[in-house]
Amino acid sequence: PEGTTHTELKSMPFRQGAFRVAAALGTPVIPIAIEYSRPEDAWIGSSTFIPHFLTVFGRRRIYIKMRYGAPLTDTDPERLLQRTQEWIDAQVREMRKQWFEEEGFWENRY
């Protein structure tokens, strides 16, 4: 919904189009939060897709955390967008905190 990727703890502004359609049709939105163990695994900055893909997917392992939320519905697209974004932001903060709290994570994997 952001139209890009990044490594911030808070999502970028979401594009509203899909939320307008979902609200108008009564279609649920299922929020998904993804957090990479290493910031450089995310496709960010000025790197182009193919070189990034070859670098990252050439690694033996890539560690991510992923969470799926309960379906969200709302007749107000702005409220639906806000609820979705708040859920995703909370999950990303929690998952990033977990990466740093997992004892020995960095030593055992890299």
Image (tube, grey):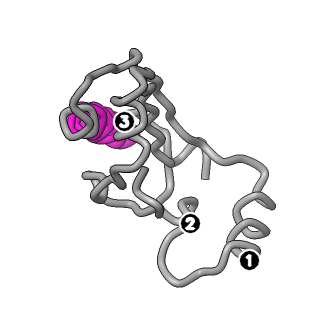
Q: Is residue 84 on the magenta stretch?
A: yes
Position of residue 25 relative to residue 54, above or below, is above
Q: Single out the mark in the foreground, 2 or 3.
A: 2
Image-based side of 83 in relation to 30, left or right: left
Which is nearer the eye, 1 or 52? 1
Q: Which mark is residue 51?
A: 1
Marks 2 and 3, how far apart at CA? 18 Å
Decide: few, some or many residues near mark 1? Use Cα within 10 Å; few <14, some 14-19, many ≥20.
Answer: few
Position of residue 13 relative to residue 97, above or below, is below
Image-based side of 80 in relation to 53, left or right: left
The span picked out in magenta is 82-100
What residue is shown at x 50% (from left), y 48% (from top)?
A: 36
Does label 1 or label 3 sit earlier along the sequence? 1
Decide: few, some or many residues near mark 2? Use Cα within 10 Å; few <14, some 14-19, many ≥20.
Answer: some
In x, y percent, where is residue 109?
61, 45
Q: Name the residue under label 3.
A: 95
